[in-house]
Structure formats: C-alpha cells, structure tokens
Image: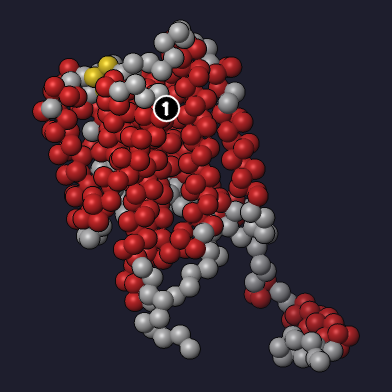
Amino acid sequence: MPSASSPVTLAPTTRSPAAGGGSPSRLRPVVTIAVVIAVLAFWPSIAPNPYMLSAGVVVLNYAVFATAWNIMGGFTGYISLGHAAFFGLGAYGTALLVIHTEIPPFLALALAAVATAVIAIPVGFAALRVRGASFVIVTIALVLVLQLVFQSARSVTGGSNGLVVPRPFPDLLRPEHHRLFFFLFLGLLALVLLAWLVIDYSRFGAGLKAVREDEDKAESLGVPTGRLKLVAFILSAFFVAVAGGMYGLWFGDLDPIFQFDVVLGSNIVLMALLGGVRYLFGPLVGAIVVGVALEYFVLNYGETQFHLVATGLLLAVVVLFLPDGVLTGVHQLLQRFRPQATSIRELSAEDLRAQQDERATADATTGADPATGKEGS
C-alpha cells in the first residue's frame, strides 16, 4: 500500500496540447514537425536576396535557442535569463578548439557543447537550490560574470576586439554559405523539437511538469525534484551550446558583449513566452515574430535603442494580455467555435423526458444497471 513518503510513479499522461495531448496517435506531432520543417525549407528558394537569407538563419538560430531554453523553462517553470552564458560558452569553445587545434569544426562544436554541459552541472546544482526571483538573479549574475571574464582574457578570447572564427567552408561564396547554414540550423531545429517531444511523452517530462505545477507537493509525494531539474538544466544548456557553436561557425566573429548578453537571454525568454511555453512550436512561433521584428527595427532604425523599447513594450503586452502565449490564445479562440455540451437549461421538460426514455430503452436492451450504466453479468 503506498504511503505519503513512498516515491510516486509518474505516468506521462498529461501531454502538451500542441504535442498531441489528448490524441491517441503519437505520430501526429512527429508528422507535424516534418511538415513544419519542410515548409521552412522553402525559404532559401523564395528569399529575394542574401540579406533575407541571412535573416532567416538568424531567426532559426533564435528558434533553436528558444526551444532549447524551453526544455528547462517550459517544463519546470524556472525562468532563466542567463542561458546566454551557455550560448557564449558553446560559441567560444567551438571557436577556440577550431583555432588552436586541428579538430574538424563540427567535431569541435560537439566537444564544446559537451564541455558546456559538464560546466552546467555545478552551475545548475548551485542555481537550482533557489526558486523564483532568486533563481532569475543567479542566472543573470552568471552571464554577467562570464562576460567580464571573457572580456578580461584578451590573450585568449580577443576581448572587446573580438575573435575571428575560421569558416568551415572557405570555398563557398557568402550566399551559398548562408544557404548551407540555413539547412544546418533547420536540421538542428528538428533535432531539438524531437528532443522536446520525447521529454514531453516521457516519465521524466511528467516529473518536470509536476515541478512546474507544484514543486512542494511533488516533492512531498516522492518525486526527485532536484535531480529532475538538474538533468533538464544540463540538457537545455547542451542544446543551447550547440546553437551557440553553430552560430560561431556561421557568423565567424565573436564578441563577449554580444555573446554573453542579458538582453539576448531576455529576448529568448520573450520568444518562448510569446509563442507559449507549453506548446511544442511555441518558441518557434515566438522566434519568428520577435526575430522578424528585431531585424525590422535594426534595418529601419539602425543602431538606435528603439528596438529595446519596442521589445520591452512587446513583453509588457504579452505579460498583460497573453500570459500563456499566442498559441494558447488561438487554441481558446478555436474552442469557442466548436460544438459545446448542451446545458440542461436549454432543454425543455419534454426533451429531458425523451432522453431518459431513450436511455432506459437502451439499458433494458443491454441489461445495464440504469443507476450506474454498467452492464449486468
């Protein structure tokens, strides 16, 4: 007989709506991912110029970053503004390995991501001991400290002068370079979406959702909340580092001010919140909206700080009117147009009597108990 102190077996029954929650088929979200990736793959064919193609690469980079962040933030409810630290570590780790060793660029990227995941273990162990605003402050402190460290270590990182990363495909012209990395980022996005989906269906994901809903109750029921949070934190850091390493190989120029940037981390959180953290494609939708908006502001207003003002206003609108994201709002809107269960107030006495007679006739035919509806033996 289970007791309050006995560990609880978590069944992965509560799936996210967009990940097929309530659907008998688990293949539907996988097919949906394939369709979305196939649609996005048309962008290089219709992009009017190399700038628009590079903008597509930037948006995909945001989408990978936001989806990877959502493995931690979406499942557990722990809002980290410091995931840019792992992005920067992945980018600089890849760059330094490429520059100082003869390792192939993409092997260097994988090694840098693994190293970042190892670094995330003690960081997560310390940061996850606190919750709420304290956790947010700890993550901000992490990214600020790393920014100062990488700026100070000029002999290794180049400091504010930046670090030039050798291109992995030096023979390609710039448009072909953008096109190739667009598809590489697209493949990475598919991988991260599948990882998020696997977690969503797993017992591990069910435990993370229990943390999100009520961590104290989950802990009292025997859910190993600390261990689950730490694993989610490490997985999230790993995929964010892969996104950072890929960005370094694509862009070819790194600066601690931009790679270890709290604003970058805030934008990623905004993307996930805007799309909906409980949805598989929520961060992708948010990345497209915010990423396109940021590119528009930079293109039309240059290096002014107007994009920061616009981003702040957008964040305020999301928090006030769409706290659960755009996809949640769309889902609720669609629900209004679906057939609703008829209220008893909308039925006349004759209708109710007719329904009772039909039910009684059906029960008599099947031999079921009218009180319980169960068939007799």
Classify residue 176 as left or right of residue 311: right
Classify residue 330 as left or right of residue 269: right
Residue 161 is at least partly visible in this image: yes
Q: Residue at x 38, y 53 (%)?
A: 232
Residue with the most extreme right position: 365
Q: Nearer the viewer, residue 284 or 326?
A: 284
Please name the residue that numbered disc 1 is placed on.
106
Q: Is residue 317 above or below residue 181?
A: below
Q: Residue at x 59, y 40 (%)?
A: 33
Q: Nearer the viewer, residue 356 or 26?
A: 26
Q: Quadrant of residue 130?
A: bottom left
Q: Nearer the viewer, residue 282 or 195?
A: 195
- In which quadrant will I find the C terminus? bottom right
The colour scheme used to paint the residues is secondary structure
Q: Quadrant of residue 365?
A: bottom right
Residue with the most extreme left position: 152
Q: Residue at x 46, y 59 (%)?
A: 205
Q: Residue at x 48, y 89 (%)?
A: 1
Classify residue 265 as left or right of residue 212: left
Q: Position of residue 104 (x, y in %)?
A: 40, 23
Q: Position of residue 190 (x, y in %)?
A: 53, 37
Q: Position of residue 357 (x, y in %)?
A: 82, 84
Labels in figure, total: 1
